[in-house]
Amino acid sequence: MDLYRRRPPAQGGDLVPPVMPSEGVHGFCYLARQASLYFGSTRRHATEWRPVVSAIADQGRRYVLPATTTRDRAFYALRRERCFLKRQGNQQADSWLCPRMEPIEVRELIELGVLPHEESLRILNWLRQRERA
């Protein structure tokens, strides 16, 4: 079985995320191993790492919104300059956030930076609008 095409094991317990905070999504930008995510697990060309944005921080786990560089109208368009990078020189492309949250352990993530508060509020509003539709 291909490392990048397998469905990762559930990461312990109930996968229902905690309640979304009203003050916006958690808003940290990370890299996550593709093998730890469901999103993108069927792609033709393997990628080892995928950018994600944390929506909810819950103890040692983050509920993340996986990102893709493929434009998709159903996804949230996140411009590369909206993430304040921890280290300069990190090349990052515009991304589109998938609305389906996935749990992942903090120790499996590499922190890239953080989103401004107004962007985290926009993402939260986008998620809520999708829930209502």
Image (cartoon, rainbow, N blue to C red):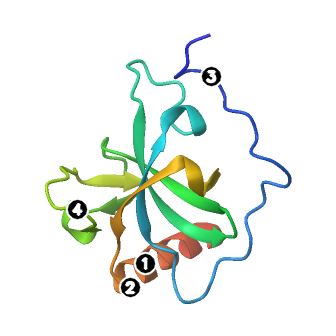
Image depth: mark 4 or mark 3 in front: 4
SS label for mark 3:
loop
* Residue 110 picture location, percent across and down: 43, 52
Q: How far apart are marks 1 and 3 (CA)?
A: 31 Å
Q: How far apart are marks 4 and 3 (CA)?
A: 32 Å
Query: Does label 4 or label 2 sit earlier along the sequence?
Result: 4
* Residue at x-position 30% and y-position 44%: 69
Q: Dot 4 corresponds to which residue? A: 87
Badge number at residue 8: none
Which of the two residues, 37 or 96, is positioned nearer the viewer here?
37
Amino acid at circle 1: Ser
Amino acid at circle 4: Arg
* Residue 67 relative to residue 15: left or right: left
Image depth: mark 1 or mark 4 in front: 4
Q: Dot 3 corresponds to which residue? A: 6
Amino acid at circle 3: Arg
Query: Does label 1 or label 4 sit earlier along the sequence?
Result: 4
Quadrant of residue 132 within the rendered picture: bottom right
Which of the two residues, 124 or 60, is positioned nearer the viewer here?
60
Q: Dot 2 corresponds to which residue? A: 117
Q: What crowding class fits label 4: few (fewer than 14 Cα within 10 Å), some (14-19), or many (20 or more)?
A: few
* Residue at x-position 55% and y-position 58%: 64
